Amino acid sequence: MQWHSVGEFFAMGGYALYVWGSFGACALLMVAEPFLARRRLIEVRRSLIRERLADELESQQRTR
Amino acid sequence: MGDHGGIEDCIRVSQSIVQWFRFASPQSFYPLAGRMVPWFWAAAAIFGIAGLWMSFFVAPTDAQQGEGYRIIFVHVPASWMSMFIYLVMAFWAGLGLALNTRVSSMMAQALAPTGALMAALSLWTGALWGKPMWGAWWVWDARLTSELILFFLYLGFMALQAAIDDPRRADKAGAILALVGVVNIPIIYFSVKWWNTLHQGSSVNLAKSSMATTMLWGMLLMALAFWMYSIAVALMRVRAIILERERHTEWVKHAVA
Amino acid sequence: MNPFLATVRRDVLLAMRRKSEVLTAVFFFVIVTSLFPLGIGPEPVLLKKIAPGILWVAALLATLLGLPRLFAADHGDGTLEQMVLSPSPLGLLVAGKILAHWLLCGLPLVLLAPVLGLQFDLDASALGVLTLALLLGTPLLSLIGAIGAALTLGVRGGGVLLALLVLPLYIPALIFGAGAVEAHIAGLDVGGHLSLLAAMLVLAAFFAPWATTAGLRIALE
Amino acid sequence: MNPFLATVRRDVLLAMRRKSEVLTAVFFFVIVTSLFPLGIGPEPVLLKKIAPGILWVAALLATLLGLPRLFAADHGDGTLEQMVLSPSPLGLLVAGKILAHWLLCGLPLVLLAPVLGLQFDLDASALGVLTLALLLGTPLLSLIGAIGAALTLGVRGGGVLLALLVLPLYIPALIFGAGAVEAHIAGLDVGGHLSLLAAMLVLAAFFAPWATTAGLRIALE
Amino acid sequence: MLNVSGLACSRGERRLFADVGFSLSPGEWLHVQGENGSGKTSLMRLLVGLSPADAGSILWRDEPTPSAEFRRDLIYLGHHAAVKEDLTPLENLRLAAALDGIALDERAALAALIRLGLRGREELPVRVLSAGQKRRVLLARLLTRPAILWVLDEAFNALDVAAVKLLGDLIAEHLANRGMAVLTSHQPLPVPGGKTLTL
Amino acid sequence: MLNVSGLACSRGERRLFADVGFSLSPGEWLHVQGENGSGKTSLMRLLVGLSPADAGSILWRDEPTPSAEFRRDLIYLGHHAAVKEDLTPLENLRLAAALDGIALDERAALAALIRLGLRGREELPVRVLSAGQKRRVLLARLLTRPAILWVLDEAFNALDVAAVKLLGDLIAEHLANRGMAVLTSHQPLPVPGGKTLTL
Ligand code: HEM
Ligand SMILES: Nc1ncnc2c1ncn2[C@@H]1O[C@H](COP(=O)(O)OP(=O)(O)OP(=O)(O)O)[C@@H](O)[C@H]1O
Ligand SMILES: Nc1ncnc2c1ncn2[C@@H]1O[C@H](COP(=O)(O)OP(=O)(O)OP(=O)(O)O)[C@@H](O)[C@H]1O
Ligand SMILES: [Mg+2]
Ligand SMILES: [Mg+2]
């Protein structure tokens, strides 16, 4: 292994900004994207459930 | 014997076609996708961890570029995926246009943002690599330019689909655009390449002659991780799209119980 | 009369009725090419160097500017519906419209380019190559542009979305077109560039009317 | 609500409804700036030299592209008639529309220009001057453009005629705007350029809404 | 209140009408009749001040038009839909009011739309509405903007039977409140009384 | 000749109609009725093949539409004017015929325009014509293009009394020549007989 200390690892031989900028951007976007996709799914589900509730309420009122 | 095998083959093929159409219905694809997603996440995580280990702790320091070269482990996979996803997206879109299978159009729609993301990452990491290596964030090199155009093609596809309300119409229009784009990508690639080399010798050239095998492995593992990630996230997105579009059908009402 | 020719005639007639239309497309080309020396400064060597690029980009933008109107007017007043329902094949009518667009927006640029090239001090043979490249390139621009125009028809954000879709596809034409002139100035052979342009033109002539027709049918649904 | 603010809000809302509209104006700017290197060739020194000119011309064309729609939509569906007949002063409504146009077409360009400048390898202080010049220049472009849009409203050959009318008026903005950046790169003082831009902006802010209003009334007659 | 005299209008080389005059007092309305192309729309546009007359005078409250006061007192609905296709009926109505400098709360706007039979369409973009529904969105403005003089050009076009009756009732109500109206139509109008002007 | 069955159409989340069916033989016509927004225009567009139906079949001469033959036999005039504002009525008529691949000489075109009461307007750009005159230019196509099935959406809109009668006569003539027609209108139609379909 070529790293002698944690500091050296993070310094990346002077290329810290570039290397961590790249890996960081990848990490950020690749965490954000699934998160957004998941939220989209949850939101559709939630609105579907809401709609069902509204249907039920309406039919209750009608039978009453 | 040969005859017999032929018939069996026919049956198998037709069965798989039937199977394929079964999964081509949103109703059966939705749960299938749901079951596949965790597996792809797991694979992405495993390959990703292994790849990161290789890229930071196994692969040696590059003689010319020092530690800066390690950007390669995200840059190349992102670049590859951005190109590959476009092909897959156009394939699904074209299938949807030709056979009117709804799921394939939805798949194309789900892939586009991931492809755009990969193109953006390729541009971003490339720019961050270029500054220390060439001293400029951006040069009008053939590869860079065609990647930029690819990014625009993704954006165009997404903008067109977003601009059309009726999903059926959006699918068809998007499919035509994606197919036209596929015809154009090789043309663009070669034109840009030729354009660039006509002017100046490639002052822009990475010494990639003797890549250490550990480097190569790191890159391949990372590429696999990116691949698995793309599939997983596209499947997640296609599930949302299926629910959005099919929200008035009975099965969706039951599925979300 | 043949429906194809009838469409060409109709569109040309319509453009002539709005007299200024043809002239102003040309003026746009002229003005854009004249803007750059103003923005960049008056160094002759520099200007000569960038002349092919600027002339091509200007031609490309001038073509682009006319594209949204290619189908929009017919769509807005219901004529397009009538064309779809007409007994004549839609592909023929669409091809006629594309040809008319080139006659009105492309051809004048081809004819004018040599004059504008003089402004940048290009010599006669370079002007010849420029004109030839534009002659091959501008129909290509019209053909590709028609696909974009059909796909964005009646869509929110039309005109600019069209630019977004079409410009990336224009890039090969731009590179080979401007490249031909630059290569000629640098003393290289231009046959390769021009035959590639011609090949792309043939390819587009086959596929673009088809894709455009499909796009129009979708737009009307 | 104040009719001025109501107009701004309405136009922004309309643009947002057509989601892609705002984004694509910006994309157009991005794509046009990227086209020039493709036409001209990839030499960094040359590109850096012509960068300010190219960015300014692109900003100008991007603004121009949105102009025909400034009043055309309201004219086509009769809303403009209603605005003329409205109890609120027409000048106020027009000023609101111009401000909305700048917010949608001008401001995003100002914000984006530094990023695009990077593509041409401009340094940080040059990018600062570029941004400042655009911040002063783009409202000027919107104000002048509005006059042209009003005058060409409903006129045959509209869009391109508009370009023809407006581009000559844009030239001072282009010269001083691009000139400021070039002067800065050449190590000269840029105060003069910028204050001239500011002076033109103030002048236009006073007169343009008035002239636009008059143009609109004529167009509706 | 409205006094028109000696009005003349020509288009191209054709004199459409000359010496047209009439006057309206509160509670009165005028039916402008004539064949296609006889100049009804042209007259309306002169009346509201959108185009200048060749001759003649138009006085509102004894002052020449177009004055700011006249514009405040006037609603003109023409052949055009004058609604934004991308906005919903509700947004259209509220923004039109805001442009006129009038405060219109959601409740009042909704009530107007519902009165015009657009229940359930408040949130759709106008683009997808039917021809008649688009006209109704425009007509809702009659309820949300107080004005004394209504100038309606072919307002009954594209409306179904129920909507024609509704609009007739609205006009009658308006007249009963000392309003005035100038209407054109090729169909018989469901409003009683009224002067007639034939071009 | 025209057999429609089981037609269904929905827009957005709203089902406009389902299971609509009718058939027309030569000499028959159908009046599609319904309130604003009930789906008349949508039905017409399905019928001529401009938009796809959710379900159902449309047969013309026992073959599914849209076929080339169907397009040859069909004239559809919709809400839109479908005339070029910059051209004269005469040019409009002749170019429309040329696009359809039909030879139309000046004499025949002029005769059609005159029959529609556009005498004296043949050489004006359509832009300056009145609303009713524009409709008449469009309607002149009924005379210049031979077709068996006329699909007219609100064709009586904006027409004055004389023109309404004229169009009624044209339709009656067409039916007498073994033609067919599908019409919508909110006014009573001046054509005798006819089936009715209420949406
Ligand atoms: C914004 C800038 C950049 C973009 C858009 C970009 C784009 C791409 C693309 C599209 C590929 C895949 C092409 C292929 O496999 O043939 C790629 C691969 C690669 N790039 Fe970049 N790149 C950029 C900057 C850089 C820089 C600065 C370097 C190094 C100094 C670099 C080194 C590489 C290497 C080593 C590969 C893999 C080579 C191969 O597989 O053939 N890139 N890049
Ligand atoms: N430049 C011109 N030259 C000759 N005639 C013209 C010109 N411009 C307009 N016209 C005529 O002026 C008249 C304008 O009529 P207008 O639109 O006011 O009619 P209208 O009574 O509203 O008709 P409709 O009932 O059809 O709506 C038309 O007859 C038109 O032909
Ligand atoms: N996306 C949508 N969501 C909900 N409803 C919609 C949507 N698109 C259209 N509609 C409704 O579909 C109907 C379309 O009606 P269509 O234009 O066919 O009516 P029509 O019978 O021709 O009416 P008119 O008499 O007014 O011309 C309208 O009621 C409209 O509100
Ligand atoms: Mg009229
Ligand atoms: Mg209708």
Image: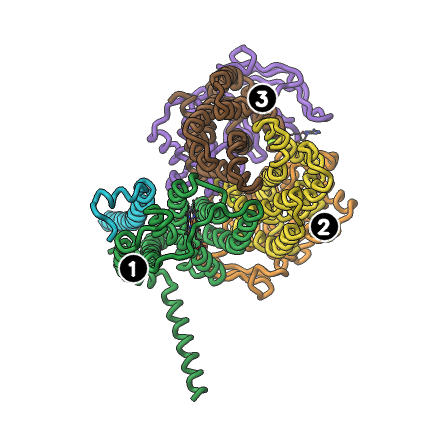
Chain colours: A cyan, B green, C yellow, D brown, E purple, F orange
- Residue carrying label 2: C5
Residue closest to the eye, C155 or E44: C155
- Secondary structure beneath disc 2? helix
Whether residue E87 is situated above or below residue A42 in the rendered picture: above
Q: In this view, does B240 lie to the left or right of D136?
A: left
- Residue C149 seen anywhere in this rendered image of the structure: no
Q: Residue at x 60, y 61 (%)?
A: F67
Residue F52 x %, y %: 50, 56
The verdict on label 2 being within 8 Å of ligand 2 is no
Kind of residue at disc 2:
Leu
Q: Residue furthest bottom?
A: B1
Dot 3 falls on which chain?
A: D
Of the numbered discs in the image, which one, if any, rests on residue B40? 1
Q: Is residue B32 left or right of residue C34?
A: left
Q: Residue at x 43, y 42 (%)?
A: B134
- Residue carrying label 3: D215
